[in-house]
Amino acid sequence: LSGGGRPRWGDFTGGAFPGQDPPAAPRPPQGRPVHVVDVTDDHARTVAARYADVALVRATTPVQAAGERDRLLEQAGSFGRRPGSARILVSLLVDLGDGERAAEPGHGGGGPRPTGRGPLYRGGPVDLAELIAAWHAAGVADGFHLVPVEPRRDLERLVNGTAALLQHRGLFRTFYPGSTLREHLGLPRPVTPYATSGATLTASDHS
């Protein structure tokens, strides 16, 4: 597309086909893929603040999570981004090998422990649900990115244990009304740089 949203004719000749026709492919439903940035250092934080749709932050306490969120939002604002243009998720490694046993000291209500791979929660799915509910009530992030250390074992416990308990409390959705990841995250559909001035597109603008 050219400026103003008008079709721009291609000008390419290759071995398989000429490129003298206007583009026929429709714009993707999401506008573009969702950009996820893992905020592991200051450089990654700057990249996330400027470009990310989803930023993954490390934190072992709600206070630390809130600080990471506030730094990201302040830096994003300096790049001219509007509130709500990105989602900030707390990234946690989870080890549910202890089944229903209570979380080890330093986990549970005290928060995950720092490790070389990132904050680690080790305990049972019930205590993990309690931790997520408490951090959610504090409003420190938009959600959580949970990484099971043993997927074959822990995914079932996450789904049938932690997620089920959060659904019972009304803290986790039971269905996804949208059809794209961008809609699931509640993110607006990005405006094409060729759109006319003042045009605004959101995830609901396509069928």
Image: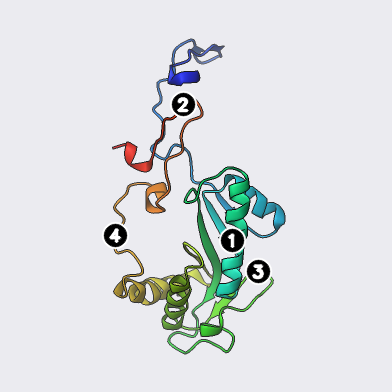
Q: Earlier in the sequence, mark 2 or mark 3?
A: 3
Q: Amino acid at mark 3?
A: Arg
Instruction: Say which residue appears at 43% left-offset and 73% top-offset.
Output: 137
Instruction: Say which residue appears at 44% left-offset and 37% top-offset.
Output: 31
Q: Using a 10 Å C-alpha cutoff, classify the residue at mark 4 as few (fewer than 14 neighbours), some (14 to 19) or many (20 or more).
A: few
Q: Which residue is mark 3?
A: 117
116 relative position to 197: left or right: right
Instruction: Say which residue appears at 59% left-offset and 49% top-offset.
Output: 76
Of residues 110 and 20, which is closer to you in this image?
Answer: 110
Q: Label for residue 70?
A: 1
133 relative position to 15: left or right: left
Total numbered labels: 4
Q: Earlier in the sequence, mark 3 or mark 4?
A: 3
Q: Is residue 60 above or below residue 57?
A: below
74 relative position to 34: left or right: right
Q: Amino acid at mark 2?
A: Ser
**Residue 204 showing in the rendered view:** yes
Of residues 174 and 59, which is closer to you in this image?
Answer: 59
Q: Position of residue 122 (x, y in %)?
A: 54, 81
